[in-house]
Image (cartoon, helix red, strand yellow):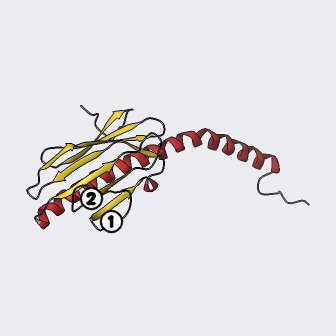
Amino acid sequence: MRRPAFGFTMIEMALVLAVLAILAALALPDLGRRMERQRLQSAAQGLAADLAEARFEAARQGQALFVEAKPALASDSAWCWAVARSAGCDCAAAQACQVHAVRNTDWRGVRLVEGLAVTLQPGGTAAGPQQRALLESSRGEQLRVEVSALGRARVCATRGSWPSMPACS
């Protein structure tokens, strides 16, 4: 008397693996796009958070802090931003005047298109020749970080639809 076999046949296993492979192939492009968008959003929110922290520290320390973002040039993909104790403190290399610095190597696939130069006063206000920065993904999606006269930073979307970001005005 033969006992019934339990488990899956080789054909059933092959069919399940084929279906899983097809589903994975369909999901990969969307997953890559989502990861790229998340990196762009995280970089923009990181700049906004650094601006908020610099505003707080300027008020706490009773001295102005400077946030400068140096965009990538057409021939060079290197970009950076830094919170510094003095104006003109270059963010490209570590220096004593920097409180905090971020470089393009921290955000792969994100490019700083337009720079930022803001002085955050101890009273909480902001002044500067350029009070907004523009970050872009390799797919052309853009987020802008704007600093109000009161020193508050906000992130908004200039291109593409972002469910969690307001559109720039």
> Is mark 2 in CB contact (under 8 Å) with mark 1?
no
> Which residue is at a point 29% across and 33% down the rendered structure image?
167
Q: Nearer the viewer, residue 3 or 133?
A: 133
- Percent coordinates x, y for residue 84 in the rendering: 25, 60
Q: Residues within 10 Å of mark 1 (few under 14, many from 20)?
A: few
Say which quadrant the C terminus sits in: top left
- Residue type pointed to by label 2: Val
Toward which corner of the image does residue 146 lie, by quadrant? top left
> Which residue is at a point 48% across and 51% down the rendered structure image?
108
Could you tell me how far apart the alpha carbons at marks 2 and 1 are, in whole angstroms?
11 Å
Task: Please name the residue that numbered disc 1 is placed on.
Answer: 95
> Which circle, 2 or 1, is nearer the viewer?
1
Q: Secondary structure at mark 1?
A: loop
Q: Seen in the image, is 121 located left or right of residue 25? A: left
Q: Secondary structure at mark 2?
A: strand
Q: Nearer the viewer, residue 100 or 93?
A: 93
- Residue type pointed to by label 1: Gln
> Which residue is at a point 10% across and 64% down the rendered structure image?
62
- Percent coordinates x, y for residue 152 in the rendering: 18, 48
In the displayed structure, would residue 157 be above or below residue 154?
Answer: above
> Which residue is at a point 59% across and 43% down the rendered structure image?
28
Toward which corner of the image does residue 132 lie, by quadrant? top left
Task: Please name the residue that numbered disc 2 is placed on.
Answer: 83
